[in-house]
Amino acid sequence: MATTIHKFNWGLRFYPVRSGYALLLVVTAMVSSCSKESEPPEDNVAPVINVISPVNKMTYEVNNIPLSWSINEENYKKGYFKINGGKEYEIGKTGSKDTVLANGTYTVHFFAEDKSSNKSSKTIEMIVNKPAPDTTPPKISFSTPENNKTYVTGEVPFSWNISDASGVASSSYSLNGVNKNINSTGSETLNLTNGNYELKVRAVDTKENVKDTTVNFVVNIPPTYKYTINPFVQPNDSTLNYYGSGDVDGNNKVEQNDVNKLEQIINGTFTPNLESNDPVEYRTLDRADVNGDEKVDSTDKQILQEKLNGTREYLPCEWNKLKTRAEREEWFQKMKKINEKSSTFPKLGVDDCNVFSWQTQINFHGTKDYGFEGTIEYGNRTLKLRDNGRFNIHMCEVTVAPNNPDYAAHRMNTFIPGEAISTYSDWFFFEPQYTHGDGKANDWLMQYAGGNRAVIKGPPRNKDFGSEGIATIRILNNKITSYNVNSNPEIRIIKTRSESNGLK
């Protein structure tokens, strides 16, 4: 600030006047100003701390956390930071420092002071939570193709889904070594020919984890057949109008009303017209005789009720459900006995082996081509249709001839209660024109002395009784010397009962 200094000068002067001289005191004031250095203003503003990193309340998924700061203060004196109350690290007005922190919760405290002893601080809170390393490969799933499955079509569906927590970087599949890139989800149809196939799907995630999933399958497209011969099942599965079916009222269903109708027959309150030309009407008693004993009585009612109640698995006539050879042979013997008493059964001394064999095929197996009325002429023989398909049991024709061509051929019948057509003993051969004996295997008209040959032919088709040979048996001195199954690729022959069951 400025200071004013006063100085005074004085002196005497004589001035003449009329009466002489006067004495005057003269005083002169001298004012001067001098300058003195000023005091600095007072500093009471604290430093300003700017924390660039880390960010307050942030969660970091890495362990390397950079610390970065700047301090706004001209008269900066000193500063530091410390983590979770630990060591103090000196800092300048600006700077950065890399820190490596384990997973956890952290408090970073910054401090700064200026030369006027003004102080400030700033605290940052953060969480370090680095995920564990991803070592899990992608997940691959696909519903088709199924592993170890055989496909009977060349169009095999292929659908897949690939997922991964870190993301799928690439995906592909190889089919028998031929590669193709694919999206993580999709589907397509593989157009294949017969053969064995290995399908491998590969996926790689963003962490370079790799996953391979492999399935093996077979394509076996069956040839196109003219028709199929399956000697293990009932030939007609579209109707219940056959012996012992339990469909007493003829509506093609087995239900409680059939038990009621059966009771009416037993009580005499209902009598079917057995002379009708309607096969549903004249076979009413056939369908009601569920145990095959040629009577309709309370036993039939009980068996049928058990089937409806679920306490009986199947009826004796349900050929496709019978479990043992004994059950099949027992039902056949009952039907054979009934057949021999029918009006359509050929007459000994009048009809030859051709009529007996062919009529047996009509009555047991049946053919939809002929209907139920009247007769037909086949091979210059007259055959009756009233019992067409009456017993619904698969029945084949057997032609027997000696190797010696001087002997005439002979026809008989066979069906298979066993398990495989290639096993001779699994067949049941019988002579339909002879009612003696029980129709056991080897009950043949085989009076020839030399070697013999028998051909098992399929059931009648398209009004042709000798439709197709299933197998050829050669016999020499009453021993089987060969058994050959028909290999015609245009005819499908079901060779085992297990194969037949697999078709259901």
Image (cartoon, rainbow, N blue to C red):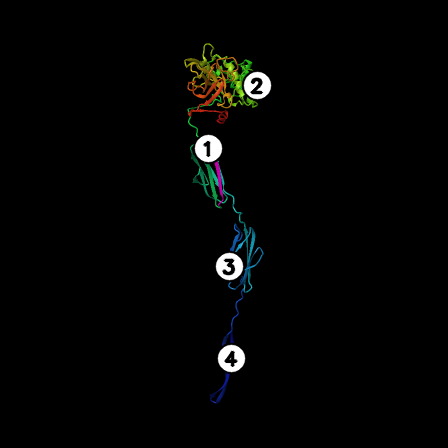
Pair 2/4: label in front: 2
Pair 1/3: label in front: 1
Contact? badges 3 and 4 (CB < 8 Å) = no
Q: Could you say which disc has been placed on residue 95 in the image? A: 3
**Spatial CA span between label 1 and label 3:** 69 Å
Q: Give the residue type at disc 1.
A: Val
Circle nearer the N terminus (3, 4): 4
Residue farthest toward the bottom in the current orientation of the protein: 20
Query: Helix or strand or loop: what does disc 4 sit on?
Result: strand
Q: Could you say which disc has been placed on residue 302 in the image? A: 2
Circle nearer the N terminus (1, 3): 3
Pair 4/1: label in front: 1
Query: Helix or strand or loop: what does disc 3 sit on?
Result: strand
Magenta residues, start to end:
208-216
**Spatial CA span between label 2 and label 4:** 155 Å
Q: Could you say which disc has been placed on residue 218 in the image? A: 1
Q: Between residues 249 and 17, which one lies in front from this camera angle?
A: 249
Contact? badges 1 and 3 (CB < 8 Å) = no
Q: Could you say which disc has been placed on residue 7 in the image? A: 4
Q: Give the residue type at disc 4.
A: Lys
